[in-house]
Image (cartoon, rainbow, N blue to C red):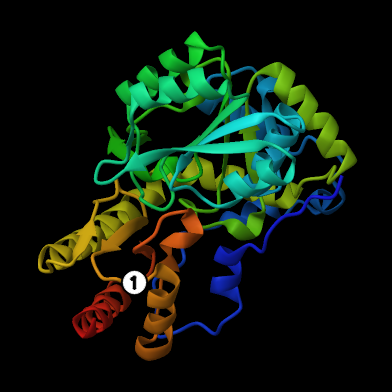
Amino acid sequence: MFLDLPKFRHVEYIVNKPAPRFDLAWSNILPNWPGVMDAVKDPLLVSAGDPLGDRALREHLASMYDVDLSRILLTNGCSEANFLTYLSALEDGDTVLTEKPIFSPLIEIPRSLGCDVHTIKRRPDNYKIDLRELREKIETLSPDLFVMQNMNNPSGKALFGPDLKDIAKVLSEFDLPVLVDEVYRDFAMSLEDGKLVNAFPSMAEIYDKAIITSSVTKVYGAGGLVTGWMVGPKRIMNRARRLKIYSVPMVNHMGNRAALDILRKRDQVLPEEFMKLREKLNLVSTWAKGRKDVHWSEPDGCAVGLLRYDHDINSIEACDRLYKDHEVRVVPGEFFHMERGFRLSVAGDYETLKKGLEQIDTFLDKL
């Protein structure tokens, strides 16, 4: 079967043009991980042949999610984990219900597999999921899979423990599996007694039919390690392992080892990064309150958020003009199936963000 996937406009928009002076598009922070390369100096890692990847990392993740080791699958990033989930959980003709706005591949991949895709809106400003609407859509559509992100991309808003339990209760009434992309989840961690603690549980801890995906790319700034993972029911995980062996059987063992070192060191490194993030989020919040033509829903500690505007201009044209005339790069809301807005990143340095907002001011004033 030919997968008729459309162009991945989001990535092309960022990588196919020179970086501007004020790049507010990247969604991953860049912590300084001391001595992380010391973890990969074992020369045997170069020729490591276990397709399951580094056992110590798998054991660490099993402990993090409090699941059996058999429910962990290491992947080449979160994107491969999402792809494997769809291939493992869906068949041609199945029905998928996804939240909206959402990271575009989470809609386009099931469509390309021949699935009928429907959406449920997470509405501003709180971007919650309406439980009554969720139940009605499940009753009407009888979907085979529900798809969501926590935190949501592009809004950076989280669904916390009570929200997740309520959603899981509805899903369990219909025995409906859910894919939850949790790649931004750890942005919501806080330091308690010297240890970072998540502000909300993983869906894998709440619902036995949850399949979660994540990686060390966004919160940990380690995309070059190409290390992600899946956690899910054994039936799905067994299918995913078989599919992975037939497609890209190996994972990056050196990346696995470095990722393990990063996860072990996060309590020492990330609190300072989160403090910087809060300062930059406060800057954007203060700036947005000073304008009557924009709406900024404060992200829950995430490095990205969705800035909506009241002007009659589509998001791609607005972002193109910001890039061309003001040297600012942000990501059009249309790429997330959301119009009249754009995703704004606070992942870079404070001064770049501040000057970028000044340029956005100038652009909006002209409108």
User: Is the N terminus in the top left, top right, bottom left or bottom right quadrant?
Assistant: top right
- Decide if residue 73 is on the left or right side of residue 215: right
Q: Which residue is mark 1?
A: 349
Residue 274 location (% of width, % of height): 31, 52
User: Mark 1 belongs to which amino acid?
Assistant: Asp
User: Percent position (x, y) of residue 143?
Assistant: 59, 24
Quarter of the rendering containing residue 170: top left
Image vertical order of residue 346 relative to residue 235, above or below: below
Left or right of 94 on screen, residue 348: left
Figure quadrant of residue 24: bottom left
Picture layout, residue 169 above or below residue 160: above
> At 52% across and 42% down in the image, what residue appears?
263
Which type of secondary structure does the marked residue at label 1 adopt? loop
Closer-to-camera residue (44/183): 183
| Count of marks overlaid on the render | 1
**Residue 257 visible from this viewpoint:** no
Of residue 36 and residue 52, the one placed in the foreground of this image is 52
Q: Is residue 284 left or right of residue 187?
A: left
Q: Is residue 362 above or below residue 226?
A: below
* Residue 299 % position (x, y): 29, 49
Question: Residue lying furthest top in this view?
Answer: 173
Front one among 209 and 90 = 90
Q: Which residue is located at x 55 percent, y 64 percent?
A: 10
> Extreme front residue here?
140
**What's the residue at 49%, 52% (across, down)?**
220
Dot 1 crowding, Cα within 10 Å, few <14, some 14–19, many 20+: some
